[in-house]
Image: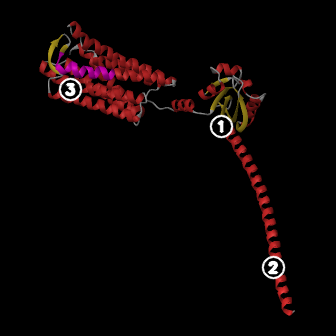
């Protein structure tokens, strides 16, 4: 056996292990399925690269090289798709970009299998058989591999600047450096020989094994591609609008949410611990903790919080006790909802109610005045009608008297 072929053999093993491990972690997640397919095609690439290294003739090596290129071309497309999903690119753009890369990769494979434009022939080298590229080898295939990997790296760089999750940052950094390995080795083994004129043993499959090691480390240490209750809780806490405050048994701050930190204007939990009692109204903090200690919980307490700058924030406080397995007190959880907007809304409603009450009184006053005027008008009309009737009777009586005379 060609001992140089141990390098692609390591890539085959790494691809197979990651394929099984990622699907075992969570086969329903699109992120996992995409990466598993990437690992699968890396395994295909490494397998045929291994066979290529051990080929007895140039013709056999040429056949294995074509199949090997299928694996790496499709694998790179899945890597780019994985990068789009991990870095949370907008779904509409993600589908467009991924589809474009898949179409390009399939087109390259079709050209490679039906022509010699990408690989012209194979020639013997000290490690086995080396690829002599065709006209499209450097014009299409190498730029496709190089540009797709660079785009994946740029996606991770952008994601590192935008994400606020500490775990996601650590995961992204490891994946970034893992992807950087095949880019560097590919540049050395594919582009450098064109400048120096001396071929170097291809390290692509071996570099994918190193990249797989980076990914495996991120999976094991930082729960990459694994949805756990603790990871879900961390993301919920980071995005929650309510203020979360976890208090140690000695009544210092153990943890607080980003929303609480931003609202209270402190840099970190240590600063807040020093001013914790000043953050609540006088003696209110100890009163709250004592009550939670006694009753195990507190519900809908209206109070205020004071920021570092002295501004008051009206809140509705709920709290509960944290106990260990043997019943001992470990700490306390306080969840506070900012009632500022609700207070403003209530004030606005009160003002509107007062305006409506005032308008109602004015309408009632106008109604009474109108009723008085209507009454006066009716009385005048009655008097006027009565006078006219009286005048008619008097005229009639006068005519009667004149007729008698």
Image location (x, y in percent) of residue 310: 72, 24
Residue tagged by mark 1? 341
Badge number at residue 91: none
Which secondary structure lies at badge 2? helix
Q: Secondary structure at mark 1?
A: helix
Q: Residue at coordinates 81% horizontally, 81% vertically from top-left?
A: 392
Judge left or right: residue 30 versus residue 192.
right
- Residue 160 lies left or right of residue 53; in this view the side is right
> Which one is closest to the eye, mark 1 or mark 3?
1
Disc 2 to disc 3, C-alpha distance: 121 Å
Which quadrant of the figure contains the N terminus?
A: top left
Which residue lies under the disc numbered 3? Answer: 67
Which corner quadrant holds the C terminus? bottom right
- Indicate left or right for 313 with 373 as reference: left
Q: Nearer the viewer, residue 83 or 22?
A: 83
Residue interval drawn in magenta: 130-149
The mark nearer the N terminus, 1 or 3, is 3
Q: Is residue 123 part of the magenta span, yes or no?
A: no
């Amino acid at each position: 056996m060609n001992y140089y072929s141990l390098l692609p053999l390591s890539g085959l093993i790494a691809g197979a292990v990651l394929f099984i491990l990622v699907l075992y972690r969570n086969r329903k997640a699109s992120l996992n399925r995409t990466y598993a397919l990437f690992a699968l095609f890396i395994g295909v690439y490494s397998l045929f690269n291994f066979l290529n290294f051990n080929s007895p003739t140039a013709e056999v090596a040429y056949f294995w090289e074509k199949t090997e290129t299928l694996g790496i071309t499709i694998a790179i497309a899945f890597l780019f798709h994985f990068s789009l999903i991990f870095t949370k690119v907008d779904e509409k753009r993600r589908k467009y970009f991924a589809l474009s890369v898949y179409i390009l990769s399939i087109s390259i494979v079709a050209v490679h299998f039906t022509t010699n434009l990408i690989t012209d022939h194979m020639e013997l080298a000290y490690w086995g058989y080396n690829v002599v590229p065709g006209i499209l080898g450097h014009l299409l295939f190498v730029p496709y591999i190089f540009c797709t990997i660079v785009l994946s790296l740029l996606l991770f760089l952008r994601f590192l600047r935008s994400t606020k999750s500490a775990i996601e940052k650590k995961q992204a950094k490891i994946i970034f450096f893992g992807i950087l390995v095949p880019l560097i080795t590919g540049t050395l083994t594919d582009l450098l020989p064109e400048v120096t004129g001396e071929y170097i043993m291809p390290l692509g499959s071996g570099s994918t094994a190193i990249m797989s090691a980076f990914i495996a480390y991120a999976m094991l240490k930082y729960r990459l591609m694994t949805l756990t209750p603790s990871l879900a809780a961390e993301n919920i806490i980071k995005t929650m609008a309510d203020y979360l405050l976890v208090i140690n048994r000695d009544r210092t701050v153990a943890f607080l949410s980003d929303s609480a930190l931003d609202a209270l204007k402190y840099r970190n939990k240590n600063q807040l611990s020093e001013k914790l009692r000043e953050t609540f109204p006088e003696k209110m903090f100890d009163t709250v903790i004592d009550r939670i200690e006694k009753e195990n919980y507190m519900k809908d307490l209206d109070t205020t919080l004071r920021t570092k700058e002295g501004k008051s924030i009206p809140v509705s406080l709920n709290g509960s006790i944290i106990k260990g397995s043997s019943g001992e007190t470990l700490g306390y959880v306080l969840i506070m909802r900012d009632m500022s907007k609700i207070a403003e809304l209530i004030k606005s409603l009160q003002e509107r109610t007062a305006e409506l009450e005032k308008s109602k009184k004015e309408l009632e006053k106008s109604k009474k005045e109108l009723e008085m005027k209507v009454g006066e008008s009716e009385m005048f009309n009655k008097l006027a009608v009565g006078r006219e009737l009286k005048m008619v009777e008097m005229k009639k009586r006068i005519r009667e008297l004149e007729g008698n005379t």
